[in-house]
Image (tube, helix red, strand yellow):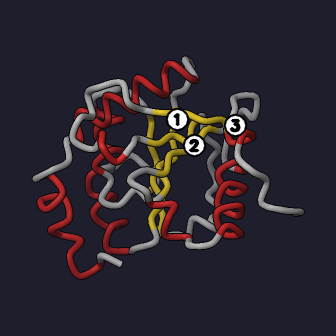
């Protein structure tokens, strides 16, 4: 999707995204929901900027997955000790299991259908160590995009969403 502009991606988004503040907010949210979490899989990691900050500034061990090989290449450079793989979020299988699976920046919207959302959530679930921590969909209202430092995150347990139909 962004392959032609992958090398400019961080520069473009840095103009209006506060990656450090977002990473801090994510780290706080993760620690409040799952205090012992240490490992994270960042699905649709893009260039790996959130993963880099979660690793360097917040002490998490973060691996990444992205569909676009150009983004995977950039993320691998930023995360030399991590496993960053190319793959489709609806069907990926990586060898590791994680305390947390992230999918940021509305990336799940690229799967386009409810059936693919269900497949994606099943892939996320399959890559978690501990299924006793509820899977949550976390959103920020559109009006909060420039006010990351405020408490505007909304976490909703996935089991409160309407079922997508029989499996």
Front residue of this view, candidates 42 and 121: 121
Q: Are marks 3 and 2 in contact (CB under 8 Å)?
A: no
The disc, 2 or 1, on the residue closer to the chain's N-terminal end is: 1
Tell me: 86 left or right of 46. Answer: right
In this rendering, does residue 156 appear at all? Answer: yes
**Contact (CB < 8 A) between labels 1 and 3?**
yes
Residue position marked by numbered label 3 in the rendering = 129
Q: From mark 1 to mark 3, how far is it between C-alphas? A: 10 Å
Relative height, residue 69 to residue 151 (above, below): below
Residue 73 to residue 141: above or below:
below
Query: Where is 85 relative to 1, above or below?
Result: above
Disc 1 element? strand
Q: Quadrant of the N terminus?
A: bottom left
User: N-terminal of the two: label 3 or label 2?
Assistant: 3
Residue drawn at point x = 49 percent, y = 51 percent = 103
Q: Position of residue 167 (x, y in %)?
A: 87, 63
Badge 2, how many Cα within 10 Å: few under 14, some, many 20+? some
Q: CA distance from mark 3 to mark 2?
A: 18 Å
- What mark, if any, has residue 39 been given in the picture? 1
Residue 122: quarter of image = bottom right
Q: Position of residue 134 (x, y in %)?
A: 69, 32
Q: Which image quarter: residue 24?
A: top left
> Label 3 crowding class (10 Å Cα cut-off): few <14, some 14-19, many 20+?
some
Q: Earlier in the sequence, mark 1 or mark 3?
A: 1
Badge nearest the viewer, 3 or 2: 2
Report the residue marked by disc 2.
137
Q: Nearer the viewer, residue 158 or 101?
A: 158
Nearest to viewer (mark 2 / mark 1):
2
Q: Residue at x 51, y 60 (%)?
A: 108
């Amino acid at each position: 999707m962004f392959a032609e502009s992958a090398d400019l991606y961080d520069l473009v988004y840095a103009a209006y995204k506060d990656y450090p503040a977002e990473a801090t907010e994510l780290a706080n949210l993760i620690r409040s929901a799952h205090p012992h979490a240490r490992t994270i899989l960042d699905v649709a990691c893009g260039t790996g900027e959130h993963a880099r900050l979660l690793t360097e500034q917040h002490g998490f061990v973060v691996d990444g997955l992205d569909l676009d090989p150009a983004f995977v290449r950039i993320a691998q450079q930023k995360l030399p000790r991590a496993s960053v793989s190319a793959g489709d979020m609806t069907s990926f299988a990586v060898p590791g299991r994680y305390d947390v699976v992230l999918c940021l920046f509305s990336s799940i919207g690229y799967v386009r259908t409810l059936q693919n959302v269900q497949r994606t959530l099943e892939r996320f679930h399959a890559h978690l160590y501990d299924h006793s921590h509820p899977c949550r969909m976390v959103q920020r209202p559109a009006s909060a995009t420039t006010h990351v430092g405020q408490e505007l995150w909304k976490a909703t347990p996935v089991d409160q969403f309407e079922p997508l139909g029989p499996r």
